[in-house]
Image (tube, rainbow, N blue to C red):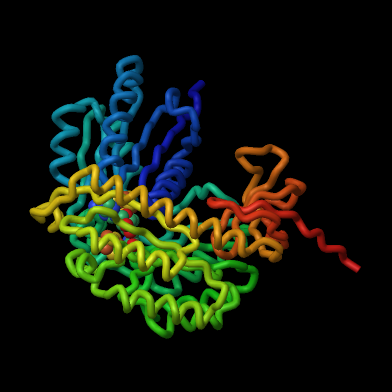
C-alpha cells in the first residue's frame, strides 16, 4: 500500500508570489499530492522566495538551515526553491556551493514546468537547475488551489518595464506581458461560478495593462459580470494613473473605493533619482482627482526611507506630503541595497542610524493619521466581506471594508463569505471594531 505524498509551500513576498504558490499547489494537487501544513513531514518542500529587500534574503538562508536538518534524517525529502531570488545568478551560485543537497531550482518564468521537473528528479534521483532568463508565452489554464473560497487573485499583467533605480523586480520578473481580456473574463466567470465574491487584479503595474483593451476598458468589462461583487487591483504606478482610470472609480459599482498608490518619497528630487517619473505636485493632484471622483476613497501607499542622497529637507518633504494627503495607511521600508540595480552604485548611501530615526518619525506620523481617519468612520455603516473568525478573539468575526480596513465584530460564523452591513463602533490605529447590523426580511 502506498501512502499519498504531500507537499508544503512556504511563500515570501508579494501577492504575485502568493498567487504563483496557489498555482504550484494546484499543479501538485493535480498530480495527486496533498497539501501538508506540517513542513517537517511533507515529502516535497517548496520555498517561493522574494528578493525585494535584504531581510527577505536573510530569512531564506535561515529556512535552508532548518530544511537541511530534515534532509539529513530523510534522504527522500525533496527540497525545491523558486521565486525571485532564483532569477539571480549570484544566488543560484551561493545555493549550489553552500547547499548542494537542494534538489530543484526553478524560476518565475517556468513554474508551469514544475510538475515535469519534479517527476524527472524523483525518477532519476538527480539534482536540477532550470531557470529561464526570459519569459515565454503566457500559459493559460493552469490549475490553482486558492486559499480562500470567496476571494481570488487574478493576474492581468506580468513583469515590469519601469526600472525604478532601487528595485530588483524588473530583473526577476522580466518585461511586461498582458493577458487577453477573454482569458481574464473566462477565469473570473469560473471563479464567480465557484462562489468567489471579490477579485484582486494583479500586476506590478496594472495601469499599463495592454491586452486587447486598456485597463479601464478591462474594469468596465469585469464590472458587468453578474454575481461578482467586488473588484480591487494592485499595484498602480502614479505615472500611469489616467483620467479614464480615475473615472472608473466614479462609474463602476463593483470597483471598491480603495487604491494602493505607492508614492515612495515626497521629494521630487528623490523621486527623480528613483526614476519614478512624477513630482510631489503631480502625485498630490492625482489624489485630488481620485477624491473628486470618489469622495470616500481609501488611499494607501508605500514609502521608502533613506534612499541614497536623501537629505533632511527631502525627508521633510515626505512628512509634508503625508500630512497633506492623510493616507489611510502605509507600508514603510528602510532602503535596502539590491545587487545589480542602479542605486547600488550611488555613492551617498545613508547611515543606518539616520535611516532608523527618520523611519520612526514617519511611522509615528502615519499611525497618528490612520487613527484619526479610522475614528472619523465611527458611527458609519460599512459593507464588510466576512473573511473568518478573528485570530485574537474566537467569538469575533473579521473581514474587510471596501476601503480595505480590517474590522472585527460579533456575529454568527454562518456569515463567513458574505457581504454584510456593519456599524463602526471604534476606530483604532490598525483596525476597526464594529457591530453587525442584522437585516430583517419583511
Ligand atoms: N510594483 C509595485 C511594488 C513593488 S515592491 C510598485 O511599483 O509599487 C513593493 C514595495 O517594496 C515598493 O513599492 C517599494 O516601496 C518597496 N521596495 C522595493 N525595492 C526596495 C528596496 N530596494 N529597498 C526598500 N524598499 C523597496
Ligand atoms: Fe519595482 Fe518600480 Fe516596477 Fe514597482 S514599478 S516593481 S517599484 S521597478
Ligand atoms: Fe518579492 Fe518578487 Fe514580489 S522580489 S515583492 S516576490 S515580485
Q: Residue at x 47, y 58 (%)?
A: 329
In front of the other: 291 or 221: 291
**Image quarter of residue 260:** bottom left
Please tell me in which quarter of the rendered image ligand 1 is found.
bottom left
Number of marks in the rendered image: 0
Depicted 123 relative to depicted 439: above or below: above
Q: Is residue 230 left or right of residue 7?
A: right
x and y percentages locating residue 345 in the rendered image: 9, 54
In front of the other: 162 or 374: 374
x and y percentages locating residue 195 in the rendered image: 63, 59
Q: Residue at x 43, y 24 (%)?
A: 40
Q: Is residue 350 left or right of residue 216?
A: left
Q: Is residue 328 left or right of residue 88?
A: right
In front of the other: 184 or 370: 370
Depicted 282 relative to depicted 190: above or below: below
Q: Residue at x 40, y 67 (%)?
A: 261
Residue 137 can be seen in this image? no
| Quadrant in which the C terminus is drawn | bottom right
In front of the other: 103 or 166: 166
x and y percentages locating residue 390 in the rendered image: 64, 43
Q: Residue at x 24, y 74 (%)?
A: 277
**Image quarter of residue 101:** top left
Amino acid at each position: 500500500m502506498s501512502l499519498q505524498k504531500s507537499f508544503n509551500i512556504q511563500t515570501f513576498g508579494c501577492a504575485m508570489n502568493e498567487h504563483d504558490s496557489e498555482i504550484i499547489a494546484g499543479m501538485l494537487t493535480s498530480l495527486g499530492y496533498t497539501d501538508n501544513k506540517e513542513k517537517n513531514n511533507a515529502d516535497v518542500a517548496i520555498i517561493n522566495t522574494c528578493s525585494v529587500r535584504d531581510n527577505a534574503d536573510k530569512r531564506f538562508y535561515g529556512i535552508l538551515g532548518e530544511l537541511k536538518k530534515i534532509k539529513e534524517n530523510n534522504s527522500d525529502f525533496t527540497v525545491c526553491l523558486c521565486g525571485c531570488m532564483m532569477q539571480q545568478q549570484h544566488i543560484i551560485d551561493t545555493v549550489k556551493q553552500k547547499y548542494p543537497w537542494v534538489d530543484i531550482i526553478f524560476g518565475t518564468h517556468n513554474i508551469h514546468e514544475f510538475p515535469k521537473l519534479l517527476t524527472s528528479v524523483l525518477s532519476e534521483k538527480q539534482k536540477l537547475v532550470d531557470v529561464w532568463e526570459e519569459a515565454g508565452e503566457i500559459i493559460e489554464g493552469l490549475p490553482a488551489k486558492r486559499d480562500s473560497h470567496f476571494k481570488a487573485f487574478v493576474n492581468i499583467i506580468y513583469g515590469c518595464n519601469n526600472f525604478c533605480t532601487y528595485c530588483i523586480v524588473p530583473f526577476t520578473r522580466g518585461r511586461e506581458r498582458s493577458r487577453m481580456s477573454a482569458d481574464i473574463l473566462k477565469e473570473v466567470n469560473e471563479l464567480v461560478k465557484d462562489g468567489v465574491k471579490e477579485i484582486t487584479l494583479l500586476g506590478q503595474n496594472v495601469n499599463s495593462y495592454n491586452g486587447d483593451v486598456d485597463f479601464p476598458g478591462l474594469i468596465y468589462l469585469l464590472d458587468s459580470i453578474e454575481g461578482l461583487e467586488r473588484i480591487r487591483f494592485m499595484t498602480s504606478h502614479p505615472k500611469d494613473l489616467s483620467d479614464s482610470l480615475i473615472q472608473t472609480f466614479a462609474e463602476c459599482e463593483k470597483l471598491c473605493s480603495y487604491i494602493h498608490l505607492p508614492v515612495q518619497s515626497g521629494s521630487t528630487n528623490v523621486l527623480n533619482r528613483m526614476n519614478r517619473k512624477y513630482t510631489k505636485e503631480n502625485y498630490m493632484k492625482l489624489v485630488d482627482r481620485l477624491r473628486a471622483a470618489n469622495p470616500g476613497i481609501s488611499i494607501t501607499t508605500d514609502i521608502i526611507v533613506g534612499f541614497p542622497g536623501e537629505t533632511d529637507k527631502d525627508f521633510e518633504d515626505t512628512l509634508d506630503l503625508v500630512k497633506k494627503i492623510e493616507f489611510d495607511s502605509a507600508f514603510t521600508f528602510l532602503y535596502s541595497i539590491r545587487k545589480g540595480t542602479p542605486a547600488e552604485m550611488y555613492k551617498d548611501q545613508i547611515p543606518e542610524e539616520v535611516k532608523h530615526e527618520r523611519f520612526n518619525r514617519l511611522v509615528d506620523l502615519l499611525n497618528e493619521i490612520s487613527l484619526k481617519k479610522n475614528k472619523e468612520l465611527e458611527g458609519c455603516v460599512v459593507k464588510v466581506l466576512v473573511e473568518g473568525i478573528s485570530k485574537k478573539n474566537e467569538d469575533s468575526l473579521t473581514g474587510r471594508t471596501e476601503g480595505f480596513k480590517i474590522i472585527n465584530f460579533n456575529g454568527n460564523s454562518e456569515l463567513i463569505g458574505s457581504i454584510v452591513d456593519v456599524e463602526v463602533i471604534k476606530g483604532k490605529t490598525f483596525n476597526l471594531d464594529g457591530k453587525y447590523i442584522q437585516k430583517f426580511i419583511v
